[in-house]
């Protein structure tokens, strides 16, 4: 009977399988490293690209912020210039107003009525004075109503006083200057906006 020793053959097959396993493990590890390296390169490239886009956006945002600040400054300067322009136009329009006011006061003032003070706030005029007769105050108010330059007289107070040992009536009266034409002229030149107030004047 012939006996065959299979141990060397089995040992050889076992070693071959081990070698194949090592090769497969090595190939798998190499492939995994290659895939990992490729993914790292791809992700790193995307991150770098995103960083570049972020830097570009930040730069553009900084430019826009600077332009916005410049626009704000220009608007503020424009508003300041318009305000100055309106003030100058208001002064030019109303520069003859005191002359017209005094002229009208002389024309509308009845005889026997004497003014003590005249105060102007914007287009409102306040006058105080003396008269011997209350009827002259009423006549003064009617004259103001009939004036093309003055309007809306309002008697605030009238009281009896003694001046130089003589009895008289002291009155306090408000009325207004008509400014419709002046305001329309200002609106046409300066555009919409709040009317410019004139400083308080005392005569």
Image: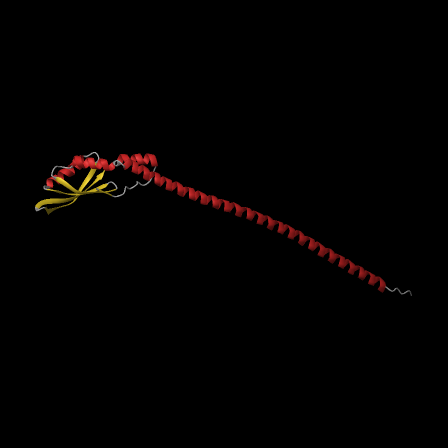
Q: Residue at x 33, y 34 (%)?
A: 189
Q: Is residue 144 above or below residue 36?
A: above
Which quadrant of the rendered structure holds the C terminus?
top left
| Screen quadrant of the N terminus | bottom right
Locate residue 63, reporting x and y percent. Answer: 50, 45
Type of colouring: secondary structure
The answer to whether one can see residue 178 in this image is: no
Q: Quadrant of residue 87?
A: top left
On the image, the x and y values in percent for residue 141 come to: 16, 39
Q: Nearer the viewer, residue 106 or 140?
A: 106
Side of 85 where 64 appears, left or right: right
203 horizontally vs 52: left or right: left
Question: Which residue: 14% across, 44% down?
Answer: 171
Q: Is residue 109 left or right of residue 36?
A: left
Q: Is residue 139 visible?
A: yes
**Residue nearest the viewer, comparing 86 with 15:** 86
What residue do we see at 84% from left, 62% from top? Answer: 9
Q: Residue at x 41, y 42 (%)?
A: 75
């Amino acid at each position: 009977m012939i006996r065959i020793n299979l141990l060397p053959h089995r040992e050889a097959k076992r070693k071959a399988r081990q070698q194949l396993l090592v090769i497969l493990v090595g190939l798998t590890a190499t492939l995994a490293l290659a895939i990992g390296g490729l993914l790292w390169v791809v992700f790193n490239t995307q991150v770098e690209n995103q960083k570049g886009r972020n830097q570009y956006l930040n730069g553009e945002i900084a430019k826009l912020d600077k332009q916005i600040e410049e626009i704000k400054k220009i608007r503020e300067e424009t508003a300041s210039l318009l305000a100055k322009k309106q003030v100058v136009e208001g002064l030019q329009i109303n520069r003859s107003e005191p002359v017209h006011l005094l002229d009208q006061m002389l024309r509308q003032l009845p005889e026997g009525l004497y003014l003590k003070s005249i105060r102007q706030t914007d287009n409102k005029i306040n006058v105080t004075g003396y008269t011997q007769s209350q009827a002259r105050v009423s006549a003064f108010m009617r004259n103001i109503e009939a004036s093309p330059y003055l309007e809306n007289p309002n008697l605030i107070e009238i009281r009896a006083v003694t001046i130089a040992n003589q009895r008289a009536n002291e009155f306090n009266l408000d009325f207004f200057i008509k400014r419709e034409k002046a305001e329309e002229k200002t609106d046409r030149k300066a555009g919409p906006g709040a009317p410019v107030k004139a400083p308080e004047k005392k005569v």
